[in-house]
Image (spheres, grey):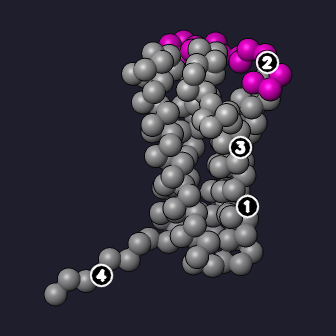
Amino acid sequence: MKRAGVALILFFAFLGLSDSIYLAQTEAGNTPLICNVENLSGCNVVATSQYSHFLGISIAEYGVLFYAFIFVIAALELVVFDRFLRRVLQGSSLIGVIASTYLTFLEIFVIHALCIYCLVSAAIALIILVFASLIEPMKRVAQP
């Protein structure tokens, strides 16, 4: 099950990487996003908002770095099969979910627009966290 879970993390990291690369490329090329999903057509509003950058770097570029890191760690885990790498996957995926939750909160309550690509990325980060948690559950200390 552990190897299958890591393989699924690799798959979802690739999907997240593809999503983030598309967002980063459209921003770099200054082209509008293709976003025709009903009630989720605020992609360009979100992508051009003041919240689309942090410390001068595009949120999409952070996404590329995040998913590339997850992909590399998961690939190493398939080869090395190390508990430390599984813990790194868990910690980094938790950070990704926290960041995605905050950004989704901004979309809903501050920007008042929803971006399908951002929501897909948030869902992928959550799925990765679930699989990362399943491949190496945290052991609880037995209480007397």
Of labels 1 and 2, the one closer to you: 2
Residue contact between numbered discs 3 and 1, judged by CB atoms under 8 Å:
no
How far across and down, in percent of the image, does residue 85 sit?
62, 72
Q: Residue at x 54, y 12 (%)?
A: 38
For label 2, the SS is loop
Residue 121 horizontal side relative to residue 19, left or right: left
For label 4, the SS is loop
Q: Using the image, determine if residue 129 lies above or below residue 48.
A: below
* Amino acid marked by disc 2: Asn
Q: CA distance from mark 2 to mark 3?
A: 18 Å
Residue contact between numbered discs 4 and 3, judged by CB atoms under 8 Å:
no
Residue 140 horizontal side relative to residue 89, left or right: left
Q: Which residue position is annotated with label 1?
A: 72
Q: CA distance from mark 4 to mark 1?
A: 31 Å
Label ID, residue 30: 2
Corner quadrant of residue 74: bottom right
Question: Is residue 42 magenta-colored?
Answer: yes
Q: Using the image, determine if residue 64 lies above or below residue 93.
A: above
| Neighbourhood count class around disc 1 (C-alpha, 10 Å): few under 14, some 14–19, many 20 upward | some
Label ID, residue 141: 4
Q: CA distance from mark 2 to mark 4?
A: 53 Å
| Neighbourhood count class around disc 4 (C-alpha, 10 Å): few under 14, some 14–19, many 20 upward | few
For label 3, the SS is helix
Of labels 4 and 3, the one closer to you: 3
The residue sitting at the left extreme is: 144
Q: Which span is picked out in magenta? A: 27-43
* Amino acid marked by disc 1: Val
* Amino acid marked by disc 3: Val
In which quadrant of the rendered image does the C terminus lie? bottom left
In which quadrant of the rendered image does the N terminus lie? bottom right
